[in-house]
Structures are given as structure tokens and as C-alpha cells.
């Protein structure tokens, strides 16, 4: 049983300081907003109502529905449309009564014709959920979303977050009436001919409020005579509604299933679609029911006794008797933007059951399962603490087990990574190389947060015989995996896997060969177990020209051999490295018997000429005894050593 607390905005119940918040009950964190215009990506003019506290400075702008023309073709999947599902952090820059100026923290497009709402995240260093936490249902202007943002940890103390049936609303059953075998794809209002479509990510067309065609993720309504409504869709498609009463031919059209929503960026937050209404002529049909809402958990860590987050679609529990049953609601969206899951996290995104009815009439279709979006590093670890229920809802029946009258269950939901959270490496290389010269293909980290490192795989294909990767002479960090495959006489593939926070370099040697141009094609991906879709990025291509002496436009470079010198005084060893590159060089100090006693990295280089660099490094030696030592440097150019005598 929900414990509801009638407390405005972000805080349902709080009993400690602002750095530790206990939340439970009903929270009102959603505010209706109307976009007036967005003259640039720098600010947005909007109108809000009085439920936005004057003290609010930070919020999140959600695009809930867009206005678009849908193809009436029967398809099981629809790609996300326009900006729907986008989530934009904003700062409330100024406010005068209901007029506000919002400043987006990222540069994104804004569609003033779309339906938006402001969501106020619940923020604290530590957030504890110690009972049932829920929110207002979506009413067409606001509701259905809970965001918990903890800078340290979210704790579940015998509590759960539950936004079941808080998403898109179900369509109403038809008005009484209709004749047998009447099919109606679109109707401007609820009528005796057909029931309403379930609500979805698309603002309804006033000329197509009702009808058997689904409205994107919303299930279609049942047509005459007594057909069932379709289930709502989200991660999985909904199920079709049951057939009409067998009173003539051709058969009336059942409510079509709500479409599954596919997103190539894997970072759209949407409600579960509502089920379509059933058709009635005896005033005992049933409405479609609502889909699940949205929960966002954002923290470095989650812990607790039992962590449970629920965004199920609504079950259509009312029987329709001698009329059509309404469709079930689809599961909603749960976002786990968390690095460490220190307790078993149970996420439920089940589709709702379609409505039952009496024998010979059309039951409702089941709702599709929802979508779970997870921080990629947690998915990559195949964390056994993450358990997901995402089944589609079963269809209704018309008299007994298995008597579905062709109504169908919803499809299972999906688990997808938050690919937009991954900061990929920067890839760079020279455009020209002299024969016998060495240059490097640099793979440089751009991940400065270090919050959730993820393993990224770069597949680099070198087409052409004038470049040779010198992998055998390299010593890579233990976190870096490099593999070379010779696919053909002129094709070499280099597979590099490394954390998003690490960098590395691949040395390339210019060869004398009939090919003077080599093409490097590079693709980037982050892979996950259990058939979870990989994160992929568009391929990159670069050309390296290898030039030799005798060509009209030759490139001549002076080769600087790798050298190392070392001097000791006042408890430190000064190491100087001369070479033809300025990439970091590993330094190892060992005894004459080979035991390593100190190490360091030379990364501070000074350019001395076109292809000559000098680097210096200081290594502490006050813990070393008097005697002879070997100082060895490991570079992409090779290995060099020098002897050193320490006097005490």
C-alpha cells in the first residue's frame, strides 16, 4: 500500500540536513511548461504555472510528445520521432510571474510545438528511500517522472521507487453503437464506430483520436463490432487486440499493437504507451490503461538491503463482459546512471495484461515491456547484482484459459547502454612519412571525469604495404590489449582495447614498397555480454603518404637515435632521453643483477630540431645503496641503456 504524503515539489518527507535526505510517499517533482520560443541555443523563453517554487534554480526539461504526421501503415517498430525523449539540464536564469528564461547547459535544438515539462530532481549527497516513493501520474501536461541525484550514494532501506501506470494514458472505450464488420482507421472523436487510441510519444491528430491504427507507441482502439484494443508499446511492441464478435464478414478490425520504440542513440527517456480502448455496444466495454513512467537514478553508488525500482505498465483488471476489452499499458523507462551497484538491484518494466471479456468478444492485447538504460561500465562488468523483469503483458481472454480470440501478448522489453555517457578517444597520426622513418598512431583519452571507466575497442585497418606496425617492440600498459592480424598481403588489422581513461600509441614504420599511399580505417565500439547492443561510432578514415628519396616531392627527415644519459647528485637521478619522438618513455633503474629498484616516466620533452626531441625526468635515489646501476628506457623507437654509479 502506498504511503502518500501531500507535500509539494521535490521533497516528500525529509528528516535530516540537506546533505542527507530521506524520501518517501508521493513527490510532486514535475511542472507544466509551455515553450514560447527558443531564438538561439543559449536561452529559452517559456511560461510555467505557480507550482514552480521561486527558489528553484536548476531543473531538467523533458520533451514528452512531438507533433508529427504518422504513416498509417501497420509496422511493429517506430524510430524515435523528432526531439521526443530528450532530456535537457537547464538553469532558470530569470523569472517574472509565470514567464521564465531558461539557459540550457548543453547546446540542443528546441521544438516550440512539442509538449514539454520541467522535472526537478531530488538532490543530496546521500539519498535514502525507506518506504514506497512514487509520483503523480502523467495528465497530459505534467507528471510521471522521478529523478534521484546523489553526489555520493543512494540507499534503499526497505524502500522502493514505483512509477507503475504513471506514463501515457489509455484510450477510452467507444461510445455505444456501431454495426458489424465496420472498420475505421481514424475518427475525430470517441464514437460508436471505434474506440480511442492509447496515448503515445506523438501529440494526437484531432482528426485521428480514435481508430484501429496504433498511434506510434499507443495501442489502436477496437472497431465495431466489440473488437479489443491493442496493447501499448515501448521497448517491446504491444500485442494486437482480439477480433470482433462473429456477426458478419469481413471481420471488423482489431486494435493494432502499439509500436516498439527504437533509438539509435540509446539515450531517449520515454513513457510506456497506453493501451487502446475496446469497442462496446452494451455499455460494458473497458478502456485501455496507462503505461509506466520514468525513473532516473544518478549517483556514483547504490546500496541497501533490497533495491527495487518499478515502472510496470498497468494491468487491465476490469472485465468487459459482452463487449471488447481494452489493451494493457507498456512498461516505462528506468535509467541506472550508476557506476557501482553494491546491492541486488531489481528493476521491473513489465507490460500490463490486456482486458478480459465474455466469450465470443475481443479481449485486449498485452502491453510491451519497457526499457532499461544502464551506465555502460556496469553493463560491461556483467554485474550479477542487476536483475531485470521486462516481460510483455499477457493478452486478455474471452471465457477461459487460451481463449484469446487472436489477441496477442506484448513483446519483451529491452536493455540498452547509455552510449552518450562514453567519451571516446581522439585518434591522430601524421599525413606524411619518410621511408625508414617512424611515426605514431596516437589513441588519446578524452575522458576527464574518471567516474566510470569503460573498455573501448578500436579496430584499425591499414590498407597498403608501405606501413608496418611495430607492435613487437612495444611494451604496453597492463590495461591495454593490442592484437595484430595480417588479413592479406596489403591489409593489416590492429585491434586495440583500453579503458576510456587511458591512452596509447601504435608506432608505424615507413617501408620501401610499390604502394606509396596507405589508408587507415578506424572504427570504435563498446561491447557488452548477453546480446545487449554495442555502442558504435561512425568510422573514421585517414591517408598516410610514404615518400622516398628520388621522388620530386620527397620528405627528408634526420633520424635521431634513442640515447639515455643519467647523473646522480643530492639523492636524485637526472635522466635525459634523446630521440626522434616526444611520446612518454618508461624508465627503469635496476641493479647489475637485474633487480628493479626504481622507475619513472619521461614525458616532458623539448623540441630541438625537425625530428629531434630531448626529455628529462627526475627519479628519487636517496633510498638506494652505493654501487653500480643500469638505467634503461623503453620507447617506441626501441630500448637504450646507460650505467650509473651512486656514491654515498
Image (cartoon, rainbow, N blue to C red):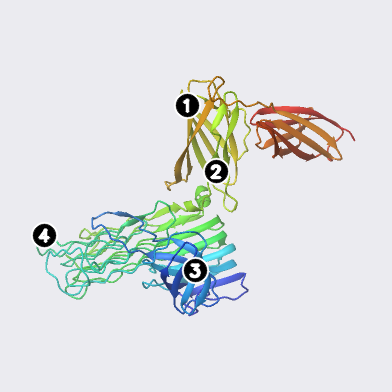
Is residue 611 positioned above or below 60 on the image?
above
Instruction: Kindly report the distance in space between the C-alpha atoms of the residues bearing marks 2 and 3.
Output: 33 Å
The residue to which callout 1 is attached is 464
Mark 2 Cα-neighbour bin, 10 Å: few <14, some 14–19, many ≥20: few
Q: Marks 4 and 2: which is nearer the front?
A: 2
Tell which circle, 4 or 2, labels the residue nearer the N-terminal end. 4
Do the numbered discs 4 and 3 sit on residues whose CB atoms are within 8 Å? no
Q: Nearer the viewer, residue 558 or 312?
A: 558
Do the numbered discs 2 and 3 sit on residues whose CB atoms are within 8 Å? no
* Image point (62%, 35%), residue name: 476
The furthest residue to the right:
648
Tell which circle, 4 or 3, labels the residue nearer the N-terminal end. 3
Is residue 414 positioned above or below 426 on the image?
below
- Quadrant of the snapshot with the C terminus: top right
Instruction: Kindly report the distance in space between the C-alpha atoms of the residues bearing marks 4 and 2.
Output: 61 Å
User: Mark 2: which secondary structure?
Assistant: strand
The residue to which callout 2 is attached is 426
Q: Nearer the viewer, residue 468 or 581?
A: 581
Q: Which quadrant holds residue 646?
A: top right
Q: Nearer the viewer, residue 314 or 592?
A: 592
Instruction: Kindly report the distance in space between the C-alpha atoms of the residues bearing marks 1 and 3.
Output: 53 Å
The residue to which callout 4 is attached is 250
Amino acid at each position: 500500500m502506498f504511503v502518500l504524503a501531500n507535500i509539494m515539489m521535490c521533497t516528500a518527507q525529509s528528516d535530516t540536513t540537506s546533505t542527507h535526505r530521506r524520501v518517501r510517499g508521493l513527490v510532486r517533482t514535475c511542472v507544466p511548461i509551455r515553450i514560447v520560443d527558443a531564438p538561439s541555443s543559449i536561452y529559452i523563453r517559456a511560461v510555467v504555472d505557480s507550482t514552480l517554487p521561486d527558489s528553484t534554480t536548476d531543473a531538467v526539461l523533458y520533451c514528452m510528445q512531438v507533433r508529427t504526421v504518422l504513416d498509417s501503415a501497420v509496422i511493429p517498430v517506430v524510430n524515435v520521432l523528432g526531439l521526443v525523449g530528450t532530456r535537457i539540464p537547464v538553469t532558470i536564469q530569470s523569472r517574472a510571474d509565470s514567464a521564465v528564461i531558461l539557459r540550457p547547459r548543453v547546446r540542443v535544438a528546441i521544438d516550440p510545438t512539442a509538449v514539454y515539462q520541467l522535472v526537478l530532481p531530488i538532490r543530496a549527497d546521500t539519498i535514502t528511500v525507506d518506504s514506497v516513493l512514487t509520483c503523480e501520474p502523467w495528465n497530459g501536461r505534467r507528471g510521471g517522472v522521478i529523478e534521484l541525484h546523489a553526489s555520493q550514494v543512494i540507499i534503499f532501506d526497505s524502500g522502493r521507487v514505483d512509477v507503475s501506470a504513471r506514463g501515457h494514458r489509455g484510450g477510452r472505450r467507444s461510445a455505444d453503437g456501431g454495426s458489424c464488420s465496420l472498420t475505421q482507421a481514424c475518427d475525430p472523436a470517441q464514437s460508436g464506430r471505434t474506440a480511442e487510441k492509447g496515448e503515445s510519444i506523438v501529440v494526437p491528430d484531432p482528426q485521428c483520436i480514435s481508430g484501429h491504427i496504433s498511434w506510434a507507441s499507443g495501442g489502436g482502439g477496437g472497431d465495431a463490432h466489440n473488437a479489443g484494443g491493442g496493447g501499448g508499446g515501448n521497448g517491446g511492441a504491444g500485442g494486437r487486440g482480439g477480433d470482433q464478435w462473429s456477426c458478419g464478414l469481413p471481420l471488423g478490425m482489431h486494435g493494432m499493437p502499439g509500436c516498439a520504440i527504437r533509438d539509435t542513440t540509446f539515450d531517449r527517456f520515454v513513457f510506456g504507451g497506453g493501451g487502446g480502448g475496446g469497442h462496446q455496444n452494451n455499455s460494458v466495454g473497458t478502456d485501455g490503461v496507462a503505461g509506466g513512467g520514468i525513473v532516473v537514478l544518478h549517483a556514483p553508488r547504490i546500496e541497501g538491503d533490497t533495491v527495487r525500482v518499478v515502472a510496470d505498465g498497468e494491468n487491465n483488471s476490469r472485465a468487459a463482459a459482452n463487449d471488447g476489452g481494452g489493451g494493457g499499458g507498456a512498461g516505462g523507462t528506468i535509467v541506472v546512471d550508476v557506476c557501482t551497484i553494491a546491492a541486488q538491484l531489481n528493476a521491473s518494466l513489465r507490460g500490463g495484461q490486456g482486458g478480459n471479456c465474455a466469450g465470443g468478444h475481443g479481449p485486449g492485447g498485452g502491453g510491451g515491456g519497457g526499457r532499461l538504460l544502464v551506465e555502460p561500465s556496469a553493463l560491461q562488468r556483467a554485474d550479477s547484482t542487476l536483475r531485470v523483469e521486462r516481460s510483455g503483458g499477457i493478452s486478455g481472454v474471452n471465457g477461459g484459459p487460451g481463449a484469446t480470440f487472436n489477441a496477442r501478448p506484448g513483446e519483451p522489453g529491452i536493455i540498452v547502454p547509455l552510449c552518450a555517457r562514453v567519451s571516446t578517444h581522439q585518434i591522430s597520426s601524421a599525413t606524411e612519412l619518410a621511408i625508414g622513418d617512424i611515426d605514431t598512431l596516437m589513441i588519446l583519452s578524452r575522458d576527464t571525469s574518471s567516474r566510470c571507466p569503460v573498455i573501448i575497442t578500436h579496430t584499425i585497418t591499414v590498407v597498403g604495404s608501405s606501413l608496418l606496425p611495430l607492435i613487437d617492440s612495444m611494451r604496453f600498459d597492463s590495461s591495454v590489449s593490442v592484437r595484430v592480424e595480417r588479413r592479406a598481403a596489403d591489409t593489416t588489422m590492429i585491434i586495440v582495447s583500453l579503458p576510456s581513461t587511458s591512452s596509447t600509441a601504435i608506432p608505424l614504420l615507413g617501408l620501401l614498397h610499390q604502394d606509396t599511399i596507405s589508408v587507415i580505417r578506424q572504427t570504435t565500439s563498446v561491447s557488452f555480454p548477453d546480446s545487449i547492443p554495442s555502442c558504435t561510432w561512425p568510422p573514421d578514415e585517414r591517408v598516410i603518404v610514404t615518400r622516398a628519396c628520388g621522388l620530386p616531392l620527397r620528405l627528408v627527415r634526420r633520424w635521431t637515435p634513442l640515447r639515455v644519459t643519467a647523473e646522480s647528485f643530492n639523492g636524485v637521478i637526472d635522466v635525459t632521453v634523446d630521440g626522434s619522438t616526444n611520446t612518454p618513455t618508461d624508465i627503469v633503474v635496476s641493479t647489475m643483477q637485474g633487480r628493479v629498484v626504481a622507475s619513472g616516466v619521461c614525458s616532458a620533452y623539448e623540441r630541438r630540431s625537425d625530428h629531434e626531441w630531448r626529455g628529462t625526468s627526475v627519479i628519487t635515489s636517496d633510498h638506494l645503496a652505493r654501487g653500480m646501476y643500469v638505467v634503461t628506457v623503453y620507447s617506441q623507437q626501441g630500448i637504450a641503456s646507460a650505467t650509473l654509479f651512486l656514491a654515498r
